[in-house]
Amino acid sequence: MDAIIDLLIHFAIPTVIVSALFIAILLFALPREVRTVFKREVKSYFNSPIAYVCVVIFLLISNGITFWFGGLLEGGEAALYIPYFQYLPWYFIVIAPAVGMRLWSEEQRLGTMELMLTMPIAPWHAIVGKYLAAAVVIFAMLVLSFPIVWVINYLGDPDNGVILAGFVATFLTALCFLAVTSAVSAFTRSQIVALLVSIGICLVLWLGGLQPVSAAVDSLKGGALVAWPFLKFITSIGILPHFSELAKGVLGLGDIVFFVTFIAFCLFSTAVVLRVKRA
C-alpha cells in the first residue's frame, strides 16, 4: 500500500500535472496561427501509419532490451537508470529523425511549402507548430511506456522522483534530436536523406559527450591538432553529460538552459534555411 501511495505522489500525480500543462499550452496558450498548424500536423501524423509504427517500434525495442538484455529482473535493484534510461537516447537517435524527417521534406516534395509560407502566418508559426506536433508523437511514446514504472514499483521500492526525472531528461534529449531533424529536413525534399543525415548528426552529438571521446580530443597531438577546434566544439555541445545529470535526479539550471538553447538554435536554423529558400 505504501508503494502505491509513493508511486501516486512522486510519479503518477506529477506526470498527470505535467501532461495537463503540456496539453493546455498546446491547445490554449499558443498563438492561434501556431495552433492551426499544430492541429493540422497532428492529424496528419495520426491519420497515417507513421506515428503508430514509431510508437510500437519504440515500445518493443525499449521494453525488450530492458527486460532481456538490460537485466532489469536480475539486477536486484529497484532503479531504472542503468537498465532503461541509459539506453533510451540511443533509440531516439533513430526514432526522433524518423518522426521528424517529413517536417519540411514532405512540404518541399509536394510543392506545398511555398503555399504554406505565403499564408498569413509568420514562418516561426509554421516551424513551431510542426515541431510541436512531432513532439506530441514522442511524448506519446514516453507516456505509453508507463507500465515499466509499475513493474519496478511492484518489484521494489524505487525513487519515483528520480524515475520522473529520467523521463524528463529523455524527453528533452529526444526534442534536441527532433530539432536537429527539423533543420536538416528544411534542406532537402528527400525524407530518406533527411533521416540518414539527421541520424548521423544526432549520433555525433551524442558520442561527443562520451568521456573517452572528450579525453581523446584533449590528447590530440601533431597534425591532428588542425581538427582540434572543430572536435572540441563537438564535445562541448555533447548532449550526454546534460542528459546523465538530469536523468539521475540532479536538476541543474545549466542543463535546462542547454536543452532550451540547443532546441531554440536548431529551430532558428530551420527558419534561416526556409528564409533563404523563400528568397
Image (cartoon, rainbow, N blue to C red):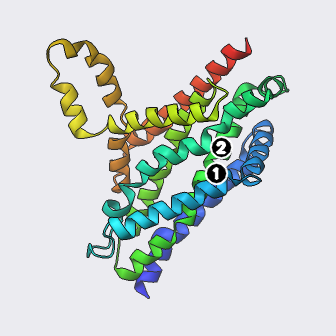
Would you place residue 19 above or below residue 269 in this image? Answer: below
Front one among 109 and 133: 109
Would you place residue 156 above or below residue 52 in this image? Answer: below
Q: Is residue 220 left or right of residue 10?
A: left
User: Label 1 belongs to which residue?
Assistant: 136
Q: Is residue 18 left or right of residue 155?
A: right
Going 42% across and 54% down the picture, which residue do you hit? Answer: 88
Mark 1 and mark 2 residues within 8 Å of each other at the beta carbon: yes
Image coords of residue 255 (percent x, y): 39, 41
Image coords of residue 165 (percent x, y): 42, 57
Give the amino acid type for the residue marked by disc 2 in the picture: Leu
Would you place residue 116 above or below residue 76 in this image? Answer: above
Image coords of residue 27 (percent x, y): 74, 50
Q: Is residue 76 left or right of residue 151?
A: left
The quarter holding residue 113 reads: top right
CA–CA distance in space, label 1 to label 2 = 6 Å
Q: Quadrant of the C terminus?
A: top right
User: Label 2 belongs to which residue?
Assistant: 132
Going 41% across and 78% down the picture, which residue do you hit? Answer: 153
- Examine the rendering and report whether any part of residue 21 can be seen: no
The quarter holding residue 31 reads: top right
